Every structure is written in C-alpha cells, then in structure tokens.
Amino acid sequence: MNNTFSMELFEEAPIIGIMRGLPAEHTAIIAENYFQSGLTCMEITMNSAGATENIAMLTKAYAGRLNIGAGTVCSMHDLEMALKANARFIVTPIINEEVIKTCVNEKIPIFPGAYTPSEIYKAWHLGATMVKVFPATTLGPGYIKEVLAPLNYVKLLPTGGIGLHNFTSYLSAGAKGVGLGIHLFPADIIHNNDWTALKKVFTLFKETYVNHLK
C-alpha cells in the first residue's frame, strides 16, 4: 500500500484535529471548514459512529489537501478496518506491537500512544513515525522538554487536555505537533450547527500557530 500521508501538509499546521463522537452527518461540513481555515490533518476515531464510512469519504474528497487518519486503533481488527477505509495515518492510545509493526511494514505512518519515558522509547524503536504522549493533561510542556533531553531524536505528539491557551507551549518545548479534540471541536457550536463560529475556532488555531513562528 502506498504511503500517501503528506509530511509537508502536516508541517504547514502541525495540529491533528481529533473528531470523536461527533454526529456522522456533520462530518463533511466540518471537514470543509477545517480545510478552508488552513488546518491540514484530521483524525476520526474508530469508536465514532460511521467512522470508516467518513474516513473513506474524506480521503477521497480531500486527496492531496488533507491528511485523514484513523484514531483509537487498539487492535488488528481496528487497523484492518481503518486501512480498508484508506486512512492515511494511524493513531493509537496504547502500544500494540502488532499494530505498530504492521503499519511500519505497510509504510503507513503510525502515532502510538505512550506515557512514560520507557514506553516512549519502546514505541519509537518499534518504528513509530511520532509518539503520541497521552494523556498529556497533567504532564504539561515541561514533561516534553525533560523527556527530550535524553531522547532528543524522538518525535513527540502530546495529546489530551491541550487547547488554544497552551498548544504553542508544547511546540516550544520541542513537540513536533499536538493532538486536539474538544477544544478544537466545541460540542455546543457543533450541536447548534454554527459553522461560521466553528470556522472561526479553526482559523484562530491556525493564526495562533502562524504567529508562534514569528
């Protein structure tokens, strides 16, 4: 299987938007606003309604324009379903060696979840593209900096409890990207079908990242 994940797209805005449990019928309009705002990577979790159908739809509709991946991939069954849907990258909350090795062999970018330095080291040496530091909620940017002192060659992607107020702090600490869920996809805005407001949220994240680079 060809690896069609675009690192160039990821680096334009190293934010992975995590769509978990959102109404499946809203996926298309959310993705369009996401794309128009300048964000580039979106993950649909496998425990969301219509996950595989929506992954397949978006990878086809946004080929070359958005990286669409599958999240919460915990088993080989999950992985097989995600790859059948043409997910361009795989994210896990745990270390499943078989899942990681299969992705490496198939040349599919894999971001496995790890918490401790030992887990992070293990995930990286199993072939992780980046290691998802999860949950990052109570760890903070300082943890990323401390882990990278001895493991400076590892690419980290902290996820969990990260929002507009602190995501650039993780990048400044050395993270290669961040994963964002509820703070990027506010439930009240989506429930009210307020797509103008949602696009403003997306745009604010992109603008904050651009300003961070200055």
Image (spheres, helix red, strand yellow):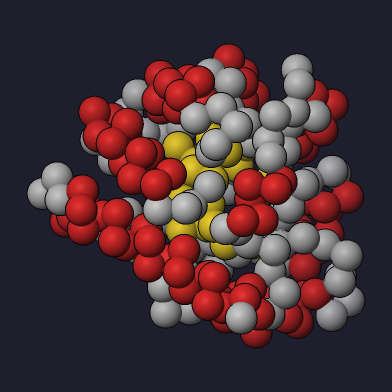
Position above or below: 51 against 116:
above
The residue that appears at 84% across and 26% down in the rendered structure is 105
Quadrant location of residue 78? Answer: top right
Q: Where in the figure is residue 40, as x and y percent of width and height?
A: 53, 47
Q: Where in the figure is residue 98, as x and y percent of width and height?
A: 76, 30
Name the foreground residue: 38 vs 162: 38
Residue 99 appears in the rendering = no
Residue 2 appears in the rendering = yes
Left or right relative to 62: residue 190: left
Position above or below: 46 against 208:
above
The residue that appears at 84% across and 80% down in the rendered structure is 149
Viewport quadrant of the C terminus: bottom right
Q: Where in the figure is residue 179, as x and y percent of width and height?
A: 53, 57
Viewport quadrant of the N terminus: top right
Left or right relative to 109: residue 179: left
Q: How many marks?
A: 0
Quadrant location of residue 186? Answer: bottom left
The residue that appears at 68% across and 80% down in the rendered structure is 173
The residue that appears at 57% across and 58% down in the rendered structure is 13
Name the foreground residue: 33 vs 186: 33
